[in-house]
Image: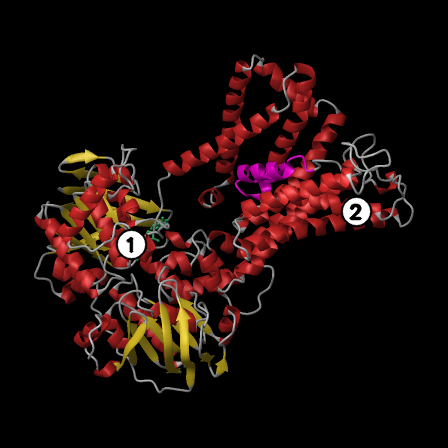
Amino acid sequence: MKIELREIHKRFGAVHANAGINLSVGTGTILGILGENGAGKSTLMKILSGYFHPDSGGILLDGAAVRLRTPADALRHGVGMLHQDPLDFPPMRVLDNFLLGREHQFWQRRSAARADFDALCSEFEFRLDPDGFMFDLTVGERQQLEIARLLWLGARVLILDEPTTGISANQKVKLFATLRKLAAQNKTVIFVSHKLEDVEGLCGRVAVLRRGALVGEAQPPYTTAGLVQMMFGQALAVGVRPAAPLGAPQLELRGAEFAGEHIVLRNVDLTVAAGEVVGLAGLEGSGQQQLLKGVAGLVALGKGSLKIGGRDLSQASYKEFLAAGTAFMAADRLEEGMIAGLTIEEHMVLARRGKQPAIVDWAVARTAAQAGIAEFNIKGAPASVVEGLSGGNQQRALLALLPPALKLLAMEHPTRGLDVESAIYIWSKLLMRRAEGTAILFATADLEELLRYSDRVLVFFAGEIMAVLRAADATVEQLGALIGGKQK
Amino acid sequence: MSSLAATERQGWVGRVLLVLGPVLLALVITSGILVLAGANPQATLLKLLAGSFGTAVKRADVAVVWVSLVICTAGLLVSFTAGQWNIGMEGQIVMGAIVATWVGRQFVDISGVLERGAPLLVIAAMVAGGICGGVVWATAAGALKVLGKVHEIFAGLGLNFVASAASIYLIFGTWKQKSGGTLSGTVLLDEQLWLPTLQGLRASPYSLGLAVVVVAAVYFALRGTLWGLQLKAVGRNLRAARTLGVATHRVLFSAYAVCGACAGLAGAVLVVGVHHRLIPGISSGHGFMGILIALLSGFQALYIAPIALFFAALSIGSIALQLDLKLDSSLAGVVQGVMVLCVLLVQGVRQWRSGGSGT
Ligand SMILES: Nc1ncnc2c1ncn2[C@@H]1O[C@H](COP(=O)(O)OP(=O)(O)OP(=O)(O)O)[C@@H](O)[C@H]1O
Ligand SMILES: [Mg+2]
């Protein structure tokens, strides 16, 4: 289906999120959309898929002007979208989720639906159990299910908003194969991403947004430097990681066991020194989260012992962990990290450690929020509610909430959803903390990031730490093989 | 609670429209019902108005109900902010009334005459006791929810039942009057233990003052204090609040305790200021009505007073309907119910029109 966007404008208060965007996408193409955090990518995609209404401007599908009132309405016109931050799923079976959104059919023919489901799965080689539960699916599998569901509901345009964060390398390969197949079937794919190599490898055309406007388009062959120049208006230097001397042990685990809902991490012996960065590699849900939450006091220690900064915290409450100087940063920004409906300054007050006056001094809170906004370059105001921030800006806000002078910082996907420039900047901030003696543990699906910023890499597989590598000696290929469960 | 999020960020113009719109809609629908019931809507509504504000006595009666509703709703605002449906408010009011009565009875003889103690101190002790009763009962619901993972609605309903059974047991058993247990309740307490009322009326300036103080305190606590912010955080996202370092259990318990304190206070005021004894069904549904008022106010303390006034007027006015027009007083309930549905409808439509939201 051919899509034409004409002079799309959308404002949120003072923010001109889309400022007169004209864009057309031909049938059977995969269009990449690039742009820095807060450029207006998600907003534009939500307008195209009926979640937002433009303030002005029009949408033409196959030459006919349409008004997309709701997402369901958009889907009726053949436009379906996979969101940047999918909502949490209720305890529901996979097939039931698949059936969601089917309209005008009170009496679901489950057997027919199941047959369709199986056909779609085998066509795209998705291995999904229709009778399994949603919460057992990895991010990548949820994505496959959502793609299958949208196709089943008749999507001819598929919009994916940052689909490659948080999925494994294999799932990414499969996703790309799927998208190429869809394009070959004359479907239109729009692919929003911060990962330049993904866009370069997949997309037949690229459009770049900056501050709400379309600033350029490119065709293959792309040059990374050229795309970066278009996105940021300047070239970027990748940060180098200065050597830092290691200090005293900040984290000591002996025979530690952490039980999660679906996986138990057993018998962990690990010492992390002040100023050390340890990267956790592995497929999503292999036990990294248990370790990160465990050392931050959010998952109770089952067996063994745990020391932070030399103090035994094996039986300590989360409060004591906080007092000892640990912090956890969640990947689920709006599920576990921040509170939708509350503003940045309110978060600043909540996140402050130690004694606080019973009556909030909002002037102080505002100043703190302004300082965080300036330091992390957040596009937002102290009184902005966090769900109104763009994905990348939510991530910055999350980082701005971390208290200073931590002993141990445990992070899931610290640069999830950040554009290249911001990721470099955020890491420079984290490395400053490291120089001050914070021990950092982080999990990510980005192997380059792991090797670039870690001192050591722990490879997780099915609830076990399979290997410990010195990052300086390891290669991406080696790491990839280990993550897949292959021994050295 | 997404409706909470949606209503919080509108200016007062939007807010007033949001309240008046449904009121008008409800009036239209109620008139329709009245016509169907064979009554003249205009006459009925005028009668309702006269029945609630026509005379000083009636205005005072409205004030009595208003006090109770306002105190209860203020408490419910606290628990709603923490995301808790304190359905157990009814039982907490009853518990407050029971304990207040018990305290009072320690100072009087078998026919209710004050035997010892300074009257003012006894009144104060009764009120304090009532508050404790409410707190204990609410904390029980909170413990069932927080520690026992029993949904607060079931916990609340169960505890309501127990409290009301306990009051009946006391009235017809342990605290039975000399002449035997009667529906009119336990023995009337000494007049010295009554809150002073306005000349010849049932309303007491003290309880009115108390209600105003409670609403003001809740308004301020929710707006300006760290605790208020923590309540909000816990109510919207428990998991994230905990990660951020909020002591979630403590905050939840405090929400129940404060809500229970308000309920207990309302129950004690019903004893010292209105009935002067324990009667069956002393809470008269004010806890439930408080939930409706809280919903209508969009969880804003500022709007509690006028909405509670409307509800109070409706309850008192509908008594006149029964006497004069032979319409059942349950009409008040119908109007209230229709109102709430209309508000939810208008809110729903607004949310739907403003479109979904996302990242
Ligand atoms: N619901 C909303 N309410 C208020 N402001 C919003 C809302 N959604 C987006 N914005 C603002 O619009 C601008 C563009 O946001 P958008 O989400 O489109 O950015 P993006 O390009 O997707 O960024 P990212 O790469 O960080 O996800 C941002 O400044 C954001 O704060
Ligand atoms: Mg986005």
Mark 2 is on which residue type? Trp
Real-space CA distance between mark 2 and mark 1, rounded to the nearest whole angstrom: 60 Å
Image coordinates of residue B279 in percent, x first then y, are 75, 36
Mark 1 is on which residue type? Gln
Residue B247: image quadrant is bottom right
Q: Eyeballing the image, is A184 above or below A298?
A: above
Q: Nearer the viewer, residue A306 or A232?
A: A306
Which range of residues does the magenta coloring cover? B283-305
Instruction: Residue at 67%, 52% (x, y): give it.
Output: B136
Q: Secondary structure at mark 2?
A: helix
Q: For this view, does B324 lie left or right of residue B248?
A: right
Where does ligand 2 appear, by image quarter? bottom left
The 10 Å Cα crowd at callout 1, few under 14, some 14 to 19, many 20 or more, is many
Residue B207 visible to the viewer? no
Q: Quadrant of the N terminus of chain A?
A: top left
Residue B210: image quadrant is top right
Q: Nearer the viewer, mark 2 or mark 1?
A: 2
Q: For this view, does A49 lie left or right of residue A265?
A: left
Colour scheme in use:
secondary structure
Disc 1: which residue: A84
Instruction: Residue at 87%, 46% (x, y): give it.
Output: B119
Q: Report the disc number at residue B102.
A: 2
Image coordinates of residue A429 in percent, x first then y, are 35, 73
Q: Eyeballing the image, is A361 above or below B10?
A: below
The 10 Å Cα crowd at callout 2, few under 14, some 14 to 19, many 20 or more, is some
Q: Quadrant of the C terminus of chain A?
A: bottom left
Q: How many marks?
A: 2
Residue placed farthest to the right in the image? B115
Q: Is mark 1 within 8 Å of ligand 2?
A: yes
Q: For this view, does A244 lie left or right of residue A180?
A: right
Residue B40 visible to the viewer? yes
- Inspect the magenta stretch and tell me whether residue A273 lies in it: no
